[in-house]
Image: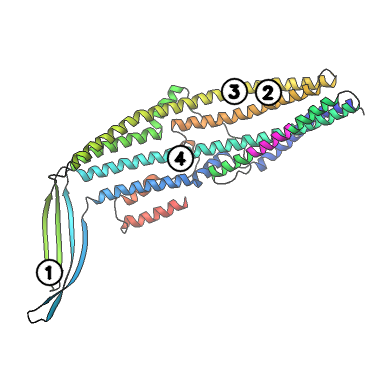
Amino acid sequence: MSAVERFNVNFKMKPILMAAAAAFTFAMTPAVMAETLTDTLIKAYKNSGLLEQNRAVLRAADEDVAQAVSTLRPVINYYANASQNSYKTLGGSNNGHTVGNIGISASLLLYDGGGSRLAIDGAKETVLATREALISVEQSVLLRAVTAYMNVRREIEFVALRQNNVRVIREQLRAAKDRFEVGEVTRTDVSLAESRLALARANLSAAEGNLARSREEYRAAVGTYPKSLQAAPKVPATARSLESARSIAYTTHPAMKKVQHDIAAAEIAVLRAETLMRPKLSMTGRVNMNHNQTDTSSLGLELSGPIYQGGMLSSVYRQAMARRDSVRAGLHITQNDVAQGVGNAWSMLAVSRATLVANNRQISAARVAFRGVKEEATLGARTTLDVLDAEQELLNAQANRISSITDQYVATYTLLSAMGLLTVEHLNLGIRTYDPAAYYNAVRRGPADSRQGKSLERVLQALGKD
C-alpha cells in the first residue's frame, strides 16, 4: 500500500473511530457520571463554613433581643458580707467582734420613658437585617458552587478536546512522514506537523493544569473534590425583561430588605436616644439578716433622672440622627448597586446566548471546511499547513462553544442571584434548610436554666446535625 493510500485510509477511518469512541462514552455515562448540579449545590450548602460563621453571627444578634427583654424583668441578687471590727480600750486591752450580713435584693423597672421597649424593637430589626445578610451569604455560596461546577465541566471538555487534537495531529504527522518518504511533500510539511504537535501537547498540559486548579476551587466551594459530573441541566427561568428583573430584585433581594431593616433600627435608635433624657422609676426591695439574727426588709420606689451630664445626652441624640441619615442614604446606594448587578447579569446572559448561536454556526462551517481541506489535500491541492490550519479553526470553534455554554449557565445563575432568587428554597433543592427563627424563639423568652433554655439545647443539637 502506498503512502497516499495509507493517508486516505487514515482520514476515512478516523470519523468511524471517533463515532465509535463517542458511542462508548455515551454508553458508559449513566454508570460513571453520578454527581449532578443539584448534588453540588446541596453539598455546598451543607459544608459551607461561611454559612456556619454567619449563622453564629445571627444567633449572637438573637441574644441581643433576649438581653433587651431582660431589662423589663425583675432583677434579683443575693449578697453576703462579713467584717472583723477591733478596738483598743483605755486599759490597753484589744477587743473586737465579727459583723456579718446576708440578704436578697430585688428591683423592677416600672418606667423609663419607653427606652427598654424601644431597645427590644431595635434589636428585633437588627435580627431581621442579619437574617437577610445570611441569605446574601447563602446566595454567594450557591453561586460559587455553580461557577465551580461549570468550570470543572468546561475544563474536562477542554482536556478531552486537547487530547483529541493531539491524536489527530499525531496522525497527520505520521501521514506527512509517509508522503515525505514517497516525495509528495517536503521536509517543511513534516516540520510544520511536528511543530503543531508540540503546540498541541503544550496546550494539553495547560488544559490539564487549568482542570487541576478548577478542581481545587470546586473543593473550596463545595467541600469535596469533584468526581464524575453530569452535564448541567436545563437552565432555570429568570425574567422576561430587564425591567421585570429589576422590579423583582427591588422587592426580593436580601440587600434591599436588609437596608430597610437597618433604617428601621436606626429610626428606633433616635427615639431611644430621646428617652435617655427622661426619668426612670423603679421598685426596689431588700431582705437582710445580720449577725445578731435580726431580720430587716424594705420595699420602696426609686425615681431618678439626669440633671446635667456635660452635654453627653444631647450628643448621643445627634449621633443617632446622623447614623439614621447615613443608613437612609445607604438605601439609594444599595438600590443602585442592585440595579447595576441585575443589568450586568442581564447583559452577560444576552451576550452568552448570542455567542453560543454564533459558535454553533462557526462549528458547522469549520467542520465543512475541515473536511473539504482534507479531501483537497489527498488530491494534492492543499498543503499540510492548510490541513493543520483548518483543524485548528475547528478546534477553536469547539472550544469557544464550550466556553459559551459555561458562560450562559454562570450568567443565568448570576442573574438569579442579582434578583435575590438564588436560594435553596427558590431552587427547590429538596433539603432541610437552616431555620433562623428556631434559635430566636428559644432564647427570646427565658433564661438558660429555664424550660426555654432546655429547649435551646435541643435546638443547638439539631442545628449541629443539619
Percent position of residue 404, x then y: 60, 27
Magenta region, main secondary structure: helix
The kind of residue on which mark 3 rests is: Thr
Give the numbered dot on residue 138. 4
**Residue at the extreme right of the image, as rendered:** 1
- Find the magenta span and give its range: 199-210
Within 10 Å of disc 3 (Cα), the crowding (few <14, some 14-19, many 20+) is some
Q: CA distance from mark 2 to mark 1?
A: 98 Å
Q: CA distance from mark 1 to mark 3?
A: 90 Å
Q: Quadrant of residue 339?
A: top left
Helix, strand or loop under label 3: helix
- Choose the circle earlier in sequence order: 1 or 4: 4
The kind of residue on which mark 2 rests is: Ile
The residue to which callout 3 is attached is 355
**Residue at the extreme left of the image, as rendered:** 90
Within 10 Å of disc 1 (Cα), the crowding (few <14, some 14-19, many 20+) is few
Q: Quadrant of residue 217?
A: top right
The kind of residue on which mark 4 rests is: Glu
The kind of residue on which mark 1 rests is: Asp
The residue to which callout 2 is attached is 363
Quarter holding the N terminus is top right
